[in-house]
Image (cartoon, rainbow, N blue to C red):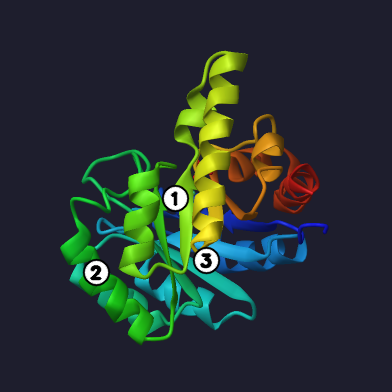
Amino acid sequence: MKEPRIKLGVNIDHIATLRQARKDIDPDPIAAAQVARQSGADLIVCHLRRDRRHIQDEDLIKLCRLKGETHVELSDDPKIVAAVLKARPSSVCLVPERPGEVSTEGGLDVVRNFKSLSKTVKRLKKAGLEVSLFIAPEAPYVRAARNLGADVVEFNTTDYVAAGTKPAQKAELERLELAAYMAWEMGMTVHAGHGLDYHNVAPIARVPHMSALNIGYSIIARSVFVGLKTAVSEMRRMVD
Ligand code: PXP
């Protein structure tokens, strides 16, 4: 049986990063979301950070009012959870967040933080949101995600992206394949992302049971030269 088409989640945080450089109105992340959607994005992804360095609360409200799926990354922080619940996205992904980090640094430690995550997952699910957990592709984390009641796991692809040799990349792909199979068998939907670009995305898109890829930096960086429409369409073609 042919696997369904993989969804492309386009993370527009860095459109807002550019706007915040001047704290002005351009470039507008809402307009960017519309262009991305018209160019092949299935999900619009953004991260409401504690330091509000890119996406602002008002952006989130507007993004969630747009037609189509808005997927919000958030940390396990009651104030952020409240702000996200107010905006009412279609789905969310809990991620770790260290103050001062340049980007998300790894997956959640869903084993060690099981208790606090359990409360937050329940709160989000009670509000009717689909809940994803950003984790490393490892069996104990997949098991804990299932026990937490996650609908989706998003596997961190940082180690795959950083693999410096073909054998190391192959080993990372196998690790992702195994974890994806395990999550799928447990009834969860499988996503992946972080650090994916035009050169490294294709093998990840072919991992069996992969359902969506969330990509931001490489698309927004390329859009500076070719425009957002072309940058998203090109990534769409790489994923297909
Ligand atoms: N997935 C998660 C959970 C993330 O935190 C990020 C970064 O915001 C991404 C995917 C996208 O990563 P990148 O910007 O490197 O494509």
Mark 2 — residue?
118
Residue placed at 48% from the left, 72% from the top? Answer: 91
Mark 1 — residue?
17
Mark 3 — residue?
187
Q: Give the position of the N terminus as an image quadrant.
A: bottom right
Residue placed at 40% from the left, 52% from the top? Answer: 142
Asked if marks 2 and 1 touch (Cβ < 8 Å), the reply is no
The answer to whether residue 192 of the structure is visible from this angle is: no
Q: CA distance from mark 2 to mark 1?
A: 31 Å
Foreground mark, 2 or 1?
A: 2
Residue placed at 23% from the left, 45% from the top? Answer: 98
Amino acid at the residue labelled 2: Ser
Q: CA distance from mark 1 to mark 3?
A: 36 Å
Name the residue nearer the viewer: 147 or 196: 147
Q: Earlier in the sequence, mark 3 or mark 2?
A: 2
Name which quarter of the figure residue 221 lies in.
top right
Amino acid at the residue labelled 3: Gly
* Disc 3 residue crowd, few under 14, some 14–19, many 20+, Cα 10 Å: few
Q: In the drawing, what numbered circle is on residue 224?
A: none
Q: Earlier in the sequence, mark 1 or mark 3?
A: 1
Residue 178 drawn above or below residue 46: above
Relative side of 59 to 86, left or right: right
Name which quarter of the figure residue 9 lies in.
bottom right
Foreground mark, 3 or 2?
A: 3
Name the residue nearer the viewer: 213 or 81: 213
Q: Secondary structure at mark 2?
A: helix
